Amino acid sequence: MSNAATEPWIRRSANPKLDRVMVSPEGVPLNVTVATAGARAGALTLDIIIIMGLILGVSLIGLLILWAFESAFGGGASLEQSGPLNVVAVLWIIAVFLFRNAYFLYFELGERAATWGKRAVGIRVAARDGGRLTAEAVIARNIIRDIELFLPLVFLSSGEASGNMTEFTAWAGFLWVLMFLLFPLFNKDRLRCGDLIAGTWVIQNVKRNLDGVVAPSSEVSIDPANGKETSRYEFSDADLAVYGEYELQTLESVLRTGTDEALLTVTSSICNKIGWEPGVGDERNFLEAYYTALRAKLERGMRFGKRRKDKFSADI
């Protein structure tokens, strides 16, 4: 038995202590690297700067609207009577709330599962059980972020602005925020409280460029009729219609870093799904051929405006 079959992990990160094996619901072991605390802190800092920039932009727009009303009505009294100040204030509060919460929800629920800050440092959110990242998990981890960070900061800033904050309150708020910010340093998977509750973690992003993933197969022959390369494995549209983009990405990960055991597990799973009899000892060639055919089918569909996110969804 080869070493790859007995040792499922292939070291590939600068910090082996953060290397993990994540097992998908199909039983496929995938190699991942947990994001460092520094990367997470950098991503959060960038996201906060972006959110503050968006809020500043909304504030400037609000001031311009008030200036336009004041110019139109000719004075502060008319402005107050017309009520635009209250309207703009309500809209500003709503915008700040959305930027603070919907920003994270929108991007982490997206295809890349990462905010602009996370993308900049090369990390993303993932489910710890290897399954798909659900809306419930993303909502839960972001609600906890409010408790961990934003609500204490809002409380401290409002108390300081009103001049009613005591020294004890200031220190209590500071220690509250510091405790949650340092929490990822005291567990091996660099999880914050939101991750523990939601069942998520933040991992280093694997390049998802599909070009060059599959090496040329040795099981390729030349068709004497037309001189073109042909694979020993040919799949019908029905064989390829059972999977979507998510399964293609999973198969990509298996071909990149999968072990012999993982290749065998995935081959058996695909064969059972499409009604084939799995062979023995040719798993990589089979998976490379299936990957190439599935990728080509999905790309053809995209050119005609059709996408299939996973095996549970229809073409959209």
Image (cartoon, rainbow, N blue to C red):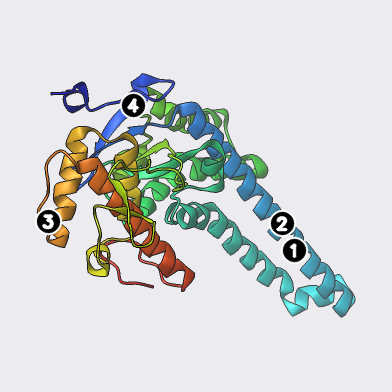
Q: Nearer the viewer, mark 3 or mark 2?
A: 3
Task: Report the residue marked by disc 4.
Answer: 19
Position in image of residue 63 (x %, y %)? 78, 63
The numbered mark, 4 or 3, whose residue comes first in the sequence reads 4
Task: Report the residue marked by disc 2.
Answer: 57
Report if the CB atoms under discs 3 and 1 are less than 8 Å apart. no
**Side of 107 relative to 251 (left or right):** right
**Please, what is the three-letter code of the amino acid marked with disc 3?**
Asn
**Please, what is the three-letter code of the amino acid marked with disc 2?**
Gly
The numbered mark, 3 or 1, whose residue comes first in the sequence reads 1
What element does badge 3 sit on?
A: helix
Position in image of residue 270 (x %, y %)? 18, 54
Report if the CB atoms under discs 2 and 1 are less than 8 Å apart. yes
Q: Nearer the viewer, mark 3 or mark 1?
A: 3
**Residue under the point 56% across and 47% down:** 116
Q: Which mark is residue 272?
A: 3
Q: Which mark is residue 61?
A: 1
The numbered mark, 4 or 2, whose residue comes first in the sequence reads 4
How far is disc 4 from disc 2 in space, using C-alphas? 41 Å
Q: Residues within 10 Å of mark 3 (few under 14, many from 20)?
A: few
**Residue under the point 35% across and 72% down:** 315
Q: Extreme front residue here?
A: 224
**Please, what is the three-letter code of the amino acid marked with disc 1?**
Ile
Does any portion of residue 236 appear in the rendered image? yes
Q: Residues within 10 Å of mark 4 (few under 14, many from 20)?
A: many
Quadrant that contains the N terminus: top left
Q: In front here: 61 or 39?
A: 39
Residue 308, quarter of picture: bottom left
The numbered mark, 4 or 1, whose residue comes first in the sequence reads 4
Residue 76, quarter of picture: bottom right
